[in-house]
Amino acid sequence: MDDLVRAVEATLFAAEQPLTAEQISAHLGQADVRPALAELKADYDGRGIRLVERGRRWHFETAPDLAHLLRREKEEPRRLSRAATEVLAIVAYHEPVSRAEIEAIRGVQTAKGTLDVLMEAGWVRVAGRREVPGRPVIYATTPDFLAHFGLESLKELPGIDELRAAGLLDPVDEEMIETALRPEPLDTSDEPPDDDGDEDTEDEA
């Protein structure tokens, strides 16, 4: 293992959070670190920990088949409501997407609290504003979303046929996923700006 590979390995071990290749390169004097990352990934394949890339960020994680050995008692995370699950699926499959576009796909108003729950979980983030009249806020997923669901990128999101074949859909889930996988959201170029206040909806976050 040459010095650059060892330096990349040490940088990732010491990092408090996942790093992009560009961040690692800047830390190591603008060295080309991609070959070193590929070598490290291959070297750790099959070991107790592995090097993975999630959302263009690299980090070490426990091998999936050994995760049960390190599992500790912890507080049960809050279970997402159906509304929050629907919104998360729509954001993942259509990002970046505004609240009006989410509502156009779902056919029902979306409470601001629903998006707040997803942002507090670290799975959804504000990705800017749409350059249309009213400049509505648009939302996208986060690297934590990819890491939680074991995805390297959104290209790995399963389609409805894959989910059905794996037996992972019940009738309620199937309806929700089919909604999220509809064609592009309706044209909302004239949508009003997002209201920061709460509104009356049928959703519960």
Image (spheres, rainbow, N blue to C red):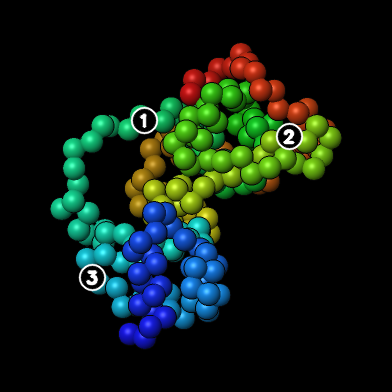
Task: Look at 68% across and 42% down and name the residue there.
Answer: 128
Q: Secondary structure at mark 2?
A: loop
Residue 48, compared with residue 176, is above or below; it is: below
Whether residue 159 is visible, yes or no, is yes
Instruction: Name the amino acid type tagged 3.
Output: Arg
Q: Residues within 10 Å of mark 2 (few under 14, many from 20)?
A: many
Residue 47 numbered tag:
3
Instruction: Name the amino acid type tagged 2.
Output: Pro
Please tell me which of labels 3 and 2 falls first in the chain.
Answer: 3
Instruction: Name the amino acid type tagged 1.
Output: Arg
Q: Secondary structure at mark 1?
A: loop
Q: Which residue is mark 1?
A: 79
| Residue 29 position in % (x across, y down) | 53, 75
Q: For the residues carrying marks 1 and 3, which lies nearer the camera in this image?
A: 3
Please tell me which of labels 2 and 1 falls first in the chain.
Answer: 1
| Residue 199 position in % (x across, y down) | 63, 16
Q: Residues within 10 Å of mark 3 (few under 14, many from 20)?
A: few
List the single residue furthest toward the left.
69
Q: Nearer the viewer, residue 7 or 65?
A: 7
Q: Which residue is mark 2?
A: 136
Position of 65 with respect to 153 (left or right) is: left
Position of 196 with respect to 205 (left or right) is: right
List the single residue furthest toward the bottom.
2
- Location of the N terminus by quadrant is bottom left
Task: Look at 43% across and 57% down and name the residue there.
Answer: 18
CB within 8 Å, label 1 to label 3: no
Residue 119 numbered tag:
none
Q: CA distance from mark 3 to mark 2?
A: 47 Å
Task: Look at 49% across and 68% down and name the residue there.
Answer: 27
